Amino acid sequence: MKHKVVSLFAGAGGLDLGFSMAGGYDLVWANDSDPDAVSTYRANFGNHAVLGDIREIPSEEIPGCDVVLGGFPCQGFSLANTGRRADDARNVLYMEMLRVVASKRPKAFVAENVKGLVLMDKGEVLRRIVADFEELGYDVKWKVLNAADFGVPQRRERVFIVGVRQDLEVDFDFPSPTHGRRPDSGKLPWVSVGHALRDIPDPDSQHDLTNHTYSKYKLRFNGYIGHRAIDPDLPAPTVTGRGDNKGGVVVLHHPSNERRMSVRELAVVQSFPVNFDFDCNQSAAYRLIGNAVAPSMGRAVAESLQHALKTAKVTTGDD
């Protein structure tokens, strides 16, 4: 029987897609407060996505589940946010995930956030988050993973926090990298952005791809986010949801360095399949892609969790 999954702060569904790709999971409920995210999620996964502020959704309206996912908002934690603070209101939304986990008592939960979370208040914020989930009766582990190490054509470091209910007596291990900058011990080479986009037609030519339009914002080469020359022989720099605090354009240059990437190209760089439909305008699609979990990295975590749960001790109420 498949593990039932509830997804909080689901966004476009990057982490959910990773779990779906892994097999063995059934996405039963998802939530986001962004209409564009929910519209896109529904277009690709089904109508089980609920639009609304999770703080206003009672726990009893959320179905029972085996796994809770939560890519809680990360802007307050981000290294790109030089004014980040532990008391930033966006930094306590993980408490809503804590509430749902406490109520539903899933076998496991998976949270994802930016690497900056590890450094917040010299690590105190992460320690607090881990301790809160441990108090609910979960064995909790965290690790910073690089998407490039799992075949994503992008250097993207994110922290994953995984908890498994203690009574299941499961020892979860994070996935080992399948790719590397310098392949050894059987690892595959990192996937370059030029290789990933090699079969994507020019957006100004005749094609049948959806979401294949691009920002005409002038190219600049000053080394800042969204204004960097792209090396086609390496994974792309990190795809981001926005740039400075004024919401500046951050769409990466195409590896030709003659224009910016289209929505479709940026999605490929995040490892979304070419038929994934972003049911929103171009600007919103760029933002959803930048804020998403790279599906291929999510899949690696999902497969490791699935492997661990196969060893779980059966307790009353478990399938």
Image (cartoon, grey):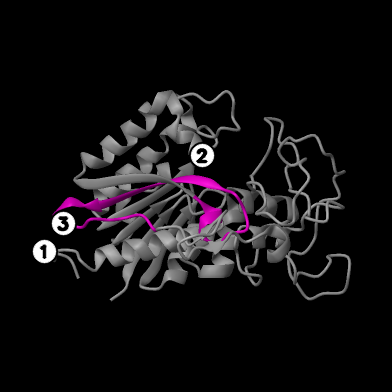
Segment colored magenta: 146-175
Residue 302 horizontal side relative to residue 141, left or right:
right
Whole-number angstrom distance, CA of label 3 to CA of label 2: 31 Å
Q: Residues within 10 Å of mark 2 (few under 14, many from 20)?
A: many
Residue holding disc 1: 316
Q: Position of residue 307 (x, y in %)?
A: 30, 67
Residue holding disc 3: 169
Q: At numbered mark 1, what does the secondary structure look like: helix, strand or loop? A: loop
Which numbered disc, 2 or 1, marks the residue closer to the eye?
A: 2
Give the mark nearer the N terminus: 2 vs 1: 2
Q: Taking 275 as reference, is 130 above or below it?
A: above
Amino acid type assigned to the residue bearing label 3 in the image: Glu
Mark seen at residue 74: 2
Residue found 51% across the figure and 69% down from its top: 45
Q: Residue furthest front?
A: 184
Which numbered disc, 3 or 2, marks the residue closer to the eye?
A: 3
- Image quadrant occupied by the C terminus: bottom left
Residue 215 horizontal side relative to residue 160, left or right:
right
Query: Does the magenta portion include 170?
Result: yes
Amino acid type assigned to the residue bearing label 1 in the image: Thr
